[in-house]
Amino acid sequence: MLGGATGPLVSLQSWVSSRFVRIYTFVTASSDVIGLVQQNEALELEVANLQKQVIEMEEDLREAQLYYALLDFARSKPDNQYIAALVIGKDPSPFMNYVILDHGSSDGVRMGMPVITEKGLVGRVDAVTANAARVQLVNSPDFAVNVQTQNTNAEGVVTGSITGALVMDMVIQTMTLQPGDLVLTSGLGGNFPSNLLIGEVRTVTRQENALFQSASVQSAVDFRQLEVVLIIRNFQPVEIDPLIPQEGS
Amino acid sequence: MSAIIGLAYLSVGMMLQTAILSRIPLINGTVDLILIVLIAWALQDGLDEWEVWVWTLVGAVLLGFVSKAPWPLYVISYVIIILLLRQVQKKVWKASVLLLFLGIALATLFQQSLFYGFYRFVYTVPLPLNESFLYIIVPSMVLNLLFAFPVYLVIKDTAEWLHPQEDV
């Protein structure tokens, strides 16, 4: 009798209980979803911050590698004294290739000082203000430097051009010039120290009836990627203009 | 106020040009942001003459200060360009945008040719004419035309802000 009466009650109880459990699960689950969404947002933010940090650290690492390379180079040539400078701009005129550095006369920069990177010659200081300097790049059309090749000692002059290509010219026909030869400053003329790397001979142009042979030179320095340079502060360019005979004299 | 805004705009323009835009060449040509700003400014209605000339001189001196080319060359080229543009603008009614593109194309051609001539014959730099035209002058013109309209919009807004009564 009692068992027959409790049967529906138990069924009802179990129905109510199961509905309660479902509702409880739904309510707690939804609050978990909200919590998960918030947690997800926080994690996404954290990931974004970490990615930003990774990018910054990669950039710092790249800069550090650049500085270390320059430092290694400077240590390998202890006779020279250097001023490290950042490239902060480029001459607005597209005909000439000049860059602007963030160091000037107050840091000891003077006109005519050679500018290099660990890879080779960049150019020379052309103008100076108290806090900035303008540098004439090797690949500027108005640039010329006396050079010689490393192995064959073929002497010539490297000039820039409006396309930025370097040409080694004025090499006498009897000298051997071949692709792969390293081109270094010769020191003649007194504007640059000797043995600064400029680049590598790519192709040689030799004509039978010409007085000189010439060659295209692949620059060792990538002028589009210039960021930090070294100015050789203890090199004094020789002023030879007074020694050049004037017309009519 | 106009002179101060001009100095600020042109200083920022020069920084952008030397620090960023000069390093993004098209072949070997680069954009001349200052030239575009000056032309866009000169084409605005309701400006006093002195406002145009102050901007022109400031822009020329700023560029001349950082460039290898002597600053008088910038002053001469910009003054001639703006002078001609102002004369044409007075004769043409409401043709600012057309004048902008035409002015920038012709001004680039004129200015780069002037610079070419200066480097070639005064500094005696060996610059081949054909290469200079194809690799520098034409690409510079294209870049200047690309930047012309966005710069014009900014300058137009600035002019309207500085001279609100002229809108009515």
Image (tube, coloured by chain):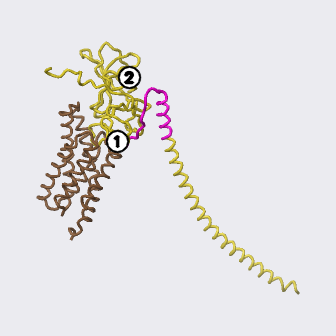
Nearer-N-terminus badge (1/2): 1
Residue A76 at x, y percent in the picture? 48, 27
Residue beneath the point at 25% across and 64% down? B162
The color chain B is rendered in: brown
Q: On the rendered structure, is A54 left or right of A16? A: left
Q: On the rendered structure, is B115 left or right of A41? A: left
Please give the residue where the numbered disc 1 appears in the rendered image.
A132
Q: Which sits in the foreground, B96 or A81? A: A81
Kind of residue sitting beneath label 2: Ser
- Quick one: label 1, few (<14), some, or many (20+) residues within 10 Å? many
Please give the residue where the numbered disc 2 appears in the rendered image.
A194
Q: Which sits in the foreground, B53 or A58? A: B53
Residue beneath the point at 19% across and 51% down? B103
Q: Chain of mark 2?
A: A
A156 vs A21: above or below? above
Residue A136 at x, y percent in the picture? 31, 34
B126 vs B93: above or below? above
Q: Which sits in the foreground, B89 or A103? A: A103
Region in magenta: A63-90
Residue A197 at x, y percent in the picture? 40, 26
The color chain A is rendered in: yellow
Q: Quadrant of the N terminus of chain B?
A: bottom left
Residue A225 at x, y percent in the picture? 40, 38
